[in-house]
Amino acid sequence: MTLKLKTLVEDRYDFADITIDLHRDMIGSVYIIRHNDIKYVLKVYKETYLKEGLLSIGIISYLNENNGPVPKIIKTKSDKNYVTFNNKIMVIFEFIEGKEVILESHENEILESIQKIHKIMNNYKGNLIKRDFSFYVLRYIDILENKEFDPNKIKELKKYGHNFYNVVTHTTFKFCHGDLHTGNMIYNKNNEIIIYDFDAAGFFNPLTDYSTLYNVTDFNNFNTNDIDQTYNILNDMKKFTEKEILQMIAFIPLRHYELIATIISVKGEENISESFYDEQYKWIKDFYDYYISKRIS
């Protein structure tokens, strides 16, 4: 695969004699390529994620045109943003030299970049996918039904999902990044936060980007103290209303459904242990029970 990609890159781009190394493999396979001692990032979207790939490339291209804090797309020889091959999409970005982003150290710069992206995207005329109940909850429910998970637990999970979704969506939808954690950022040499990976972006409650950023809950270990801490962080910012904070807290389990479905689809159901499903059921149930009983306040 690497050799074929090398040939394809050298054929479609103004690159020659490149080296290429796999960096990570999730929704897309990410490679680091080197040309004339300069590094670039190559991302290949698999056949099942072409829609996400085209969405992400369209958004980043628009942000490039409007000086948004995102990596620049490297154009092909024919001035295209991406290459289609074998039912896949390939795109190359500049490699951003910089430091790991730490929320406590770079909070002001992070918020500045988020706000800049949100403002630019208010005028975006391209297609944005509405991130609906199907995206956040039903993908996981479908997986559970197909594997004949406990029907009573499925019914409960669907109810919890509906309730959380109704809380989060009781607002005006706008652009949201959808996966805005510090792992998708880098602090560049100009003291600016560059944001990447727009694969989960879409039309939804924009406050969910802040929810993801400030969420301190543990994906594998539920603890009510983590919910309280997240609430307190958001409340202490003096930026959000009580209603908005409760929406952001409700988004945490909603995103949990979405992450589980993505993990399973990428890894394959055959590679997921049976205990994983019960553990995730308990995590969501415990979150729901605490949210309903306490309302966090």
Image (tube, grey):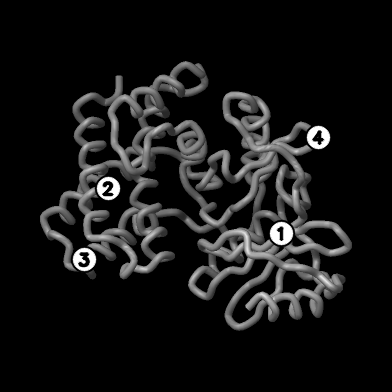
- Mark 2 neighbour class, 10 Å CA radius: few under 14, some 14 to 19, many 20 or more: many
Q: Which residue is mark 3?
A: 145
Q: Which residue is mark 2?
A: 161
Tag in front: 3 or 4: 4
Quadrant location of the C terminus in the rendered image: top left
Q: Which mark is residue 155?
A: none
The Cα atoms of the two marked residues, 1 and 2, are separated by 36 Å
Residue 271 sits above or below residue 4 on the image? above
- Mark 3 neighbour class, 10 Å CA radius: few under 14, some 14 to 19, many 20 or more: few
The Cα atoms of the two marked residues, 2 and 3, are separated by 15 Å
The residue sitting at 42% across, 32% down in the picture is 216
Q: Earlier in the sequence, mark 1 or mark 4?
A: 1
Q: Earlier in the sequence, mark 3 or mark 1?
A: 1
Q: Which mark is residue 41?
A: 1
Looking at this view, name the residue that lies furthest to the left.
152
Q: Nearer the viewer, residue 161 or 220?
A: 220
What amino acid type is highlighted by mark number 1? Val
The residue sitting at 45% across, 22% down in the picture is 233
Where does the image place residue 43, in percent across and percent down from the top left?
A: 65, 64
